[in-house]
Amino acid sequence: MKRVAAALFTATLVSVTVAGCTSDSESSDTTVTTTAGVLDRASDAVSSAANAAQGAISSAQGAVSSMQSAAAGLTSRASGAVDAIQSGTFVAAFRAGYPDLSEGRDDAAIEDIYAETCAAIDANVDEATVVSELQVRAGNGGTEATPEQAQQIYNIAKPLC
């Protein structure tokens, strides 16, 4: 913007100088009128350039805002995909490692075990408490998971959380 204004100012000075140094025998009134006209056109050109620059800045700001929104949407979708992969990995590992605890449970019930375990880990609940809660949470049909099973389930969940 400053460069455009400087260039227009320089062009105006050159025009004024050329108009003032004419070899014609024009009167000084004509030269003043010509110079005033050149100055008016230069001023209009500077205003137009300023308006164009402001429009370009507004357009760029709009484009940046649109890109930020698109990036946020992609991040959200990617995060959702990662969460689904992590949850699916836990469900598969739980079913493979603990068929007796998985029996009669749908994936959503096992995903709940994962989600509740991650929530406790994220809340900085100490490991012993989370493992103790897992004995009940992972239990099936009135039978609790063993302390060893609960610890193993914790060990599966923690890196996925």
Image (cartoon, grey):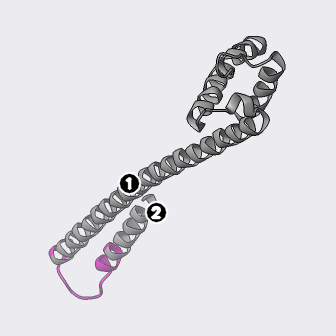
* Residue 62 numbered mark, or none: 1
Q: Position of residue 62 (x, y in %)?
A: 38, 54
Taking depth in this image into account, of 102 and 43 the one nearest to the observer is 102
**Which span is picked out in magenta?**
16-29
In the displayed structure, does residue 67 sit left or right of residue 130? left
Residues at badges 1 and 2 in contact (C-beta under 8 Å)? Answer: no
Check the image and name the residue furthest to the right: 148
Q: Position of residue 93 (x, y in %)?
A: 75, 39
Which quadrant of the figure contains the C terminus? Answer: top right
Residue 19 is one of the magenta-drawn residues: yes
Secondary structure, mark 2, is helix
Secondary structure, mark 1, is helix
The residue shown at (77%, 16%) is 127
Taking depth in this image into account, of 144 and 36 the one nearest to the observer is 144
Please identify, in this view, whether the residue under mark 1 or under mark 2 is nearer the observer: 1
Check the image and name the residue furthest to the bottom: 24
Taking depth in this image into account, of 152 and 74 the one nearest to the observer is 152
Which quadrant of the figure contains the N terminus? Answer: bottom left
Say which quarter of the image contains residue 98: top right
Say which quarter of the image contains residue 87: top right
* Residue 99 numbered mark, or none: none
Mark earlier in primary sequence (1, 2):
2
Taking depth in this image into account, of 62 and 161 the one nearest to the observer is 161
| Within-10-Å neighbours for mark 2: few <14, some 14–19, many 20+ | few
As measured in the structure, the alpha-carbon distance from the residue carrying label 1 to the one carrying label 2 is: 24 Å
| Within-10-Å neighbours for mark 1: few <14, some 14–19, many 20+ | few
Amino acid at the residue labelled 2: Arg
Q: Where does label 2 land, which residue?
A: 3
Q: Position of residue 100 (x, y in %)?
A: 73, 30
The residue shown at (61%, 28%) is 115
Amino acid at the residue labelled 1: Gly
